[in-house]
Amino acid sequence: MRSTYVNTTEIRAGDTVAVLAGKDAGKRGVVKGLVAPGRVLVEGVNKAKKHQKPRQKMSSGSQTPTIEPGGIIEMEMPLAISNVAVVCSKCDRPVRIKASRTSDGKKQRLCGRCKGVLTATKSKEVAK
């Protein structure tokens, strides 16, 4: 998988986002991670097909090679961050994000419509 990018935007891994533009406009998915500056990888969105040849691969500690099968592989490609919007769990609509601080000084993200707190749902797959 691609190397991960340090999060400096309001969109985080685990957020549910809606695609605003492109061939998958209107679809929703969970952010797997930030790939590069201004690019996000969204689960189940912007799929591309890759034709791959079979390969032999030596696994560590083994004398016999394992063979990776070839074929047509479907994989998710990164989207521009400007083409996605975070979906509020209360409003169930794509919203803009507002920033504020709690009483103890921690930053939090708020929904632009209902002012509810946005939280990223971390799953085992997203944490990889």
Image (cartoon, helix red, strand yellow):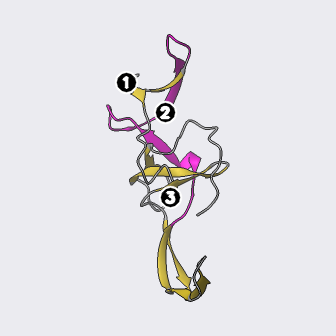
Q: Distance from label 3 to label 2 (Cα)?
A: 19 Å
Q: Position of residue 20 (x, y in %)?
A: 47, 49
Quick check: can you spot residue 18?
yes
Residue drawn at x 53%, y 87% as measured from the top left? 67
* Amino acid beneath label 1: Cys
Mark 1 sits on what residue? 114
Residue drawn at x 62%, y 41% as measured from the top left? 7
Is 25 one of the magenta-colored residues?
no
Q: Position of residue 119 (x, y in %)?
A: 43, 33
Q: Position of residue 107 (x, y in %)?
A: 55, 22
Quick check: can you spot residue 53?
no
Horizontal side of 89 relative to 107 (left or right) equals left
* Amino acid beneath label 3: Gly
Mark toward the viewer: 3 or 2: 2
Q: Earlier in the sequence, mark 3 or mark 1?
A: 3
Q: Earlier in the sequence, mark 1 or mark 2?
A: 2
Above or below for 19 versus 61:
above
Q: Which mark is residue 82?
A: none
Mark 2 sits on what residue? 96
Residue 95 found in image quarter? top left
Q: Identify the element where label 2 is drawn.
A: loop
Q: Distance from label 1 to label 2 (Cα)?
A: 11 Å
Mark 3 sits on what residue? 22
Give the magenta part as a residue range.
76-105
The quarter in which the N terminus is drawn is bottom right
Q: Earlier in the sequence, mark 3 or mark 2?
A: 3
Q: Identify the element where label 1 is drawn.
A: loop
Q: Choose between 58 and 21: the one closer to the eye.
A: 58
Rate crowding at label 3 as few (under 14), some (14 to 19) or many (20 or more) other CA atoms within 10 Å: few
Q: Position of residue 26 (x, y in %)?
A: 39, 52
